[in-house]
Image (cartoon, rainbow, N blue to C red):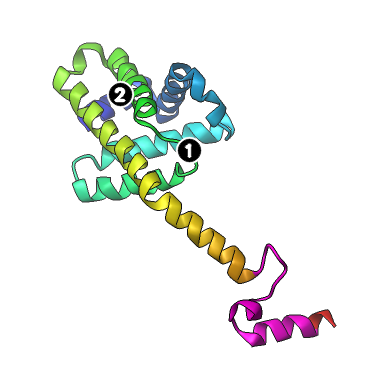
Amino acid sequence: QNVWSAFLRSAGSRDAAAEAIYAAVFDAAPSMQNLFKTPRAVMVIRLMNGIHQIFTEAHNPKELKIVAEAVGFLHLHLEVTVPRVAVIRDAIVDLVQMELADEMSPFARSGMCTILNYVGGAFIYVREKYSERLNCIAESWVQASGKNKGEGADAEGGSGEDATAEQESEA
């Protein structure tokens, strides 16, 4: 947390720090640049908010787990892999190291790497554990709601009143 706070101070503003992190991550991962579909200004804010939350909660394992899982769900649509986590981790840690120089001890660097590895692992875990379940729920919802085939809820054993009301309003 001290290193993170020092980095934010050295950048001059939270916005400048966010821009620097985004640029470092974007430049370090040319093969992943196509994954950045959100406009840059929005991504910069999201990236800073996520990283700031992670380092703010680093001292509280229960809260860090919640943050890591929540941010992991935001990345569910991406193929998060160990090599990708390493590239992003190294880009962030190298930037902080460059900005702070001697202020960042090897112990602090190791701590940042450990936290970012944990969060990256959480992203992978969330994708592996919940992606299939969420897809199953989405497919079930499509079937139950009749969105694909134009079927009403009554055809799937739902409320007949809803289907009757829809038919009456169409007549």
Name the residue located 62 percent from the left edge and 70 percent from the top edge: 145
Please say if the residues under marks 2 and 1 sit with CB atoms less than 8 Å apart. Answer: no
Mark 1 Cα-neighbour bin, 10 Å: few <14, some 14–19, many ≥20: few
- Label whose residue precedes the other's in the sequence (2 or 1): 2
Residue type marked 1: Leu
Disc 2 element: helix
- Looking at the rendered image, the quarter that the N terminus falls into is top left
- Report the residue marked by disc 1: 78
Q: Is residue 5 above or below residue 94?
A: below
Disc 1 element: loop
Name the residue located 36 percent from the left edge and 41 percent from the top edge: 123
Based on the picture, tell me whether residue 104 belongs to the magenta stretch: no
Across and down, in percent, residue 5 comes to 27, 29
Name the residue located 60 percent from the left edge and 67 percent from the top edge: 143
Based on the picture, tell me whether residue 166 belongs to the magenta stretch: yes
Q: Is residue 58 above or below residue 169?
A: above
Total number of numbered discs in the rendering:
2
Name the residue located 45 percent from the left edge and 36 percent from the top edge: 79
Residue type marked 2: Phe
- Report the residue marked by disc 2: 7
Mark number for residue 110? none
Residue toward you, 109 or 164: 164
Across and down, in percent, residue 111 comes to 19, 28
Residue toward you, 51 or 12: 51
Residue toward you, 133 or 11: 133
Q: Which residues are magenta?
A: 146-168
Cα distance between the residues tagged 2 and 1: 28 Å
Question: In the figure, residue 115 lies in which quadrant?
Answer: top left
Across and down, in percent, residue 154 comes to 64, 81
Q: Is 8 situated left or right of 80 in this image?
A: left
Across and down, in percent, residue 82 comes to 34, 30
Label 2 vs label 1, nearer the camera: 1
